[in-house]
Image (cartoon, coloured by chain):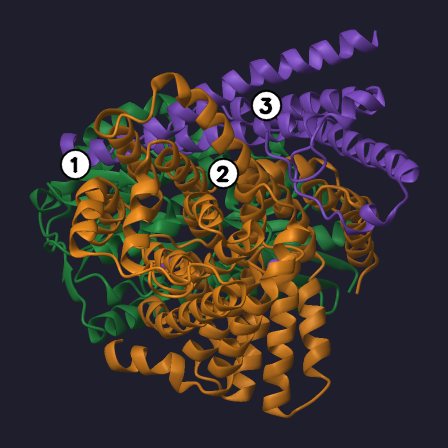
Chain colours: A green, B orange, C purple
């Protein structure tokens, strides 16, 4: 192979892992564009470090690429907080429209000054709430329940606005903490629930779809600049094809996984009235709007209404 | 093997055996490897910083400080006196108390060095006062530490469950029997050693009155592990937070109940605790730079694949797997090794038809043992640090204890029932 | 000059010691507060974990620098012990030089890291990440200073110190 790309992500290399699917689809699409030219080496399970390190590594040129959770990109480029706004996207189609359109382009463009080429957004799936206290059907059900949340101001404020008790906790301690009742629940996409066996220790899965989890498919600008013009074009053509295939695979898996979680004993419920949740978190939008940029924010809102 | 990987390993071996402190051996080897692979040296600082940004590591200073405060505050003296009164008529009794309290503490801690720190800090000086050699006591605390990773909760079991996509509950249960077997074996070593050296022989059984006095005097000390354990299993705090609760508890009892601790002593105690902490944690931090290169050069995969190509006999492959894991556990951090090797090990296990939980237990217990095997093991470093002995001196007294562990390891490798009975029954 | 170097090394170690004591106290207090806030106030503070981790990085690296000064880091002694006394003294200087070399590279790597990651913020509190990354160049320079002082110290000063695994 003429070009070797070291590609990292933090989750497992499993068949249904959205990050791993994105990596494999990207490698396959590159090979379809220019057979035999690219070799993509996989580094799953945070072998190359956590996501903060991988973003830094791409700008230093010490790693070539990564599949990175949006919330972590936002620590480098605050406007990415837009995509984590609670209940912003009602369904996958809305999310795809915004991410693939002007808004997504503008966000990814901001990474260039940091030495990173943003190729597009793969799908992590919607984040849902799981807990051991009660199913979440209305915003009131969130109240008084201790949820582990990501260490991220958007998530902390969202749970605060819903009346819940957000507990920022290290991921490494979360499983035993749920098992032993130190916390009541957490919020994650279904693929993560399954990969980490949370069905063994958690009763209720409520499909709250509170945040759409976007995964940045990113390359180091240093690595990109080393390629020939033909190779660069191949990369730019391969990425959207890989992302489309990844989204289709994730959508199919999500349905399957929910059935498997039911079979594993979880009680699963849909949320009938998402508007009631959205009304509760209106304050979060106002608070983060200035940091994200009002123009960009309004553009995104216009596309989802 | 790539050039950079060879440079990394050779530089590490030269520095380590040449007598460069371990933390700087890892660091200089990482620098050499980065230069050989033509990576920006910026990776060194990046990895060292991120190697310390791990919340569960905070359990190490927590339990070290709690242990030091329990020692200076008179809690450990009373706790040990109570145990001593209970077992003074048993040959090797105080050594057995060390092992038993480590086993008890293992149900609190998910980490081997934290267990060695908590138990070693209390028991090494006490064992020495009761006639044991400091070297033996330090080795015993070192060897008992890994029980902390076998008996749940266990941080490496959680990591393996995620890497290999296996049930964490079942993995937890798989570690209990091997942990107890190793504890029993170590108590056997204490019996033999005490027998040979005539320690604690010919002491009469304590009277009921003596037992009662010791219990009344030590009740606050006895409550310390109960507060920590109860808090974790009662779901009040996580193991990492529990270490801080232990600090607060030891502080309150030492300052206000036993009044053996003085406010003016606290700065010196804290400084001492952080010295012990940094000896271990600075190595973990720099090992993170070393491990990054090991991962990116795909070194363990190279070694594992070479081993698989040697034989197709499952008994021989399993033995080589154990040797490989012990070797890797001897030279690098087990969490990093598990993550890097996960894929290869799972595929080896599948080709041998191993139950994945059995494989997980073999991997975690191998690496747990590696925590106490020279030359590189965090329990070993903590054992040396709390006893103020050199790594070599501790190592000299370690070998009978390591033999016990290797025997248990062989048992669980070839008799899967030993680890699988509990998960099958309760999982 | 020589005496000034030793005095400065001693003074820096003393100041570092007090910083370590203060940081460790706050680190433990914030962990306790984390449990306390969840139960007594009913809602976890969002900053306790990040503050504790931030202090942990600083404390571990700072304490590692004073451990250089009094040779407290764990090492394998077996080959060194085989050397005749005169050669051993010379070899120990070489080892100190190796430590100095590491610290210099670490300081320069840390300075690069600090300048190239400017503008990032932490995950929860969103504090400027420079406050964390500053630990690398600062402790690199401190460690290099102590190593240099040790390298240039008269033999009598070094003989008075513990040689291995010595926890002062
Ligand atoms: Na444990
Ligand atoms: Na070892």
Read off the chain for label 2: B
Read off the chain for label 3: C
Quarter placement of the N terminus of chain B: bottom right
Question: Would you name the residue on which mark 3 appears?
Answer: C134
Quarter placement of the C terminus of chain B: bottom left
Left/right placement of residue C15 relative to residue A82 reads right
Question: Would you name the residue on which mark 1 appears?
Answer: C39
Task: Residue at 29% x, 82% y: name it.
Answer: B424
Picture quadrant of residue B165? bottom left
Mark 3, secondary structure of its residue: loop
Is residue B402 positioned above or below A150 on the image? Answer: below
Question: Would you name the residue on which mark 2 appears?
Answer: B53
Q: CA distance from mark 1 to mark 3?
A: 35 Å
In the foreground, B193 or A35: B193
Mark 1 or 3: the one toward you: 1
Left/right placement of residue C121 relative to residue B310 reads left
Task: Residue at 60% x, 60% y: name it.
Answer: B397
Find residue B66 and report its horizontal and vertical position in percent: 37, 37
In the foreground, A59 or A131: A131
At label 1, counting other C-alpha atoms closer than 10 Å, the crowd grade (few under 14, some 14-19, many 20 or more) is few
Find residue B197 and report its horizontal and vertical position in percent: 53, 63
């Amino acid at each position: 192979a003429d070009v070797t790309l070291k590609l990292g992500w933090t989750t497992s290399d499993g068949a249904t892992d959205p990050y791993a699917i994105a990596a494999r689809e990207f490698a396959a699409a590159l090979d379809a564009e220019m057979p035999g030219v690219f070799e993509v080496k996989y580094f799953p399970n945070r072998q190359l470090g956590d996501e903060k390190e991988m973003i830094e590594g791409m700008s230093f040129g010490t790693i070539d690429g990564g599949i990175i959770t949006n919330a972590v990109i936002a620590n480098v480029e605050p406007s990415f907080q837009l995509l984590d706004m609670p209940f912003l996207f009602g369904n996958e189609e809305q999310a795809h429209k915004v991410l693939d359109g002007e808004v997504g382009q503008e966000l990814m463009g901001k990474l260039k000054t940091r030495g990173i080429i943003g190729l597009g957004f793969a799908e992590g799936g919607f984040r849902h709430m799981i807990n051991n206290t009660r199913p979440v059907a209305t915003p009131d059900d969130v109240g008084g329940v201790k949820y582990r949340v990501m260490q991220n101001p958007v998530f902390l404020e969202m749970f605060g606005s819903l009346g819940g008790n957000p507990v920022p906790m290290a991921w490494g301690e979360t499983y035993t903490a749920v098992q032993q009742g130190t916390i009541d629940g957490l919020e994650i996409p279904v693929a993560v629930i399954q990969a980490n066996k949370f069905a063994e220790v958690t009763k209720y899965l409520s499909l709250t779809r509170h945040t759409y989890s976007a995964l940045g498919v990113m390359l180091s600008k240093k690595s990109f600049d080393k390629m020939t013009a033909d190779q660069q074009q191949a990369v730019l053509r391969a990425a959207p094809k890989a992302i489309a295939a990844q989204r289709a695979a994730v959508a199919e898996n999500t349905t399957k996984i929910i059935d498997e979680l039911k079979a594993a004993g979880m009680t699963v419920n849909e949320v009938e009235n998402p508007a009631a949740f959205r009304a509760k978190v209106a304050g979060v939008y106002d608070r983060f709007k200035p940091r994200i940029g009002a123009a960009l924010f309004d553009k995104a809102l216009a596309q989802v209404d | 093997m790539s050039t950079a990987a060879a440079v990394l390993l050779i530089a590490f071996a030269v520095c380590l055996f040449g007598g460069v402190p371990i933390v700087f051996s890892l660091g200089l080897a990482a620098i050499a490897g980065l230069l050989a692979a033509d990576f920006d040296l910026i990776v060194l600082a990046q990895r060292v910083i991120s190697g310390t940004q791990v919340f569960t590591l905070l359990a190490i200073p927590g339990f070290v400080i709690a242990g030091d405060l329990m020692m200076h505050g008179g809690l450990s003296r009373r706790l040990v006196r109570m145990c001593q009164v209970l077992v003074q008529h048993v040959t090797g009794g105080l050594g057995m108390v060390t092992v038993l309290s480590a086993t008890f503490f293992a149900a609190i801690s998910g980490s081997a060095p934290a267990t060695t720190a908590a138990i070693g800090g209390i028991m090494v000086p006490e064992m020495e006062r009761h006639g044991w050699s400091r070297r033996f006591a330090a080795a015993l605390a070192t060897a008992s530490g890994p029980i902390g990773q076998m008996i749940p909760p266990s941080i490496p079991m959680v990591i393996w469950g995620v890497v290999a996509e296996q049930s964490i509950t079942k993995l937890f249960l798989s570690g209990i029997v091997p942990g107890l077997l190793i504890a029993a074996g170590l108590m056997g070593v204490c019996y033999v050693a005490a027998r040979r050296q005539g320690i604690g022989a010919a002491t009469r059984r304590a009277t009921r009155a003596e037992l009662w006095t010791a219990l009344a005097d030590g009740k606050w000390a006895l409550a310390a592990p109960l507060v920590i354990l109860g808090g974790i299993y009662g779901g009040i705090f996580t193991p990492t937070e529990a270490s801080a609760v232990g600090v607060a508890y030891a502080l309150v009892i030492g300052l206000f109940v036993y009044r053996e601790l003085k406010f003016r002593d606290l700065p010196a105690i804290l400084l001492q605790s952080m010295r012990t902490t940094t000896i271990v944690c600075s190595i973990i931090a720099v090992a993170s730079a070393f491990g990054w290169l090991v991962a990116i050069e795909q070194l363990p995969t190279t070694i594992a694949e070479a081993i698989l190509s040697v034989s197709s006999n499952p008994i021989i492959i399993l033995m080589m797997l154990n040797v490989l894991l012990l070797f890797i556990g001897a030279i690098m951090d087990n969490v990093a090794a598990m993550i890097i090797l996960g894929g290869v090990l799972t595929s080896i296990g599948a080709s041998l038809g191993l139950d994945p939980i059995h494989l997980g237990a073999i991997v975690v217990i191998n690496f747990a043992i590696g925590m106490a095997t020279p030359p590189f093991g965090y329990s070993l470093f903590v054992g040396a640090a709390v006893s103020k002995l050199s790594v070599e001196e501790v190592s000299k007294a370690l070998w009978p204890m390591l033999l016990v562990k290797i025997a248990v390891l062989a048992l669980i490798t070839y008799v899967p029932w030993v680890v699988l009975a509990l998960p099958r029954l309760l999982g | 000059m020589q005496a000034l170097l030793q005095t400065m090394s001693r003074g820096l170690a003393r100041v570092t010691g007090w910083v370590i004591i203060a940081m460790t106290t706050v680190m433990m207090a914030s962990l306790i507060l984390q449990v306390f806030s969840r139960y007594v106030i009913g809602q976890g503070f969002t900053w306790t974990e990040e503050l504790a981790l931030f202090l942990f990085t600083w404390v571990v690296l700072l304490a590692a620098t004073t451990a250089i000064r009094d040779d407290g880091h764990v090492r394998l002694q077996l080959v060194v012990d085989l050397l005749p006394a005169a050669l051993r003294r010379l070899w120990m200087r070489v080892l100190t030089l190796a430590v100095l070399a590491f610290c210099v590279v670490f300081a320069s790597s840390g300075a690069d890291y600090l300048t190239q990651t400017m503008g990032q913020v932490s995950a929860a509190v969103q504090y400027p990440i420079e406050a964390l990354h500053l630990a690398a160049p600062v402790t690199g320079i401190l460690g290099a200073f102590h190593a240099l002082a040790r390298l240039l110290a008269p033999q009598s000063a070094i003989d008075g110190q513990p040689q291995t695994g010595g926890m002062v």
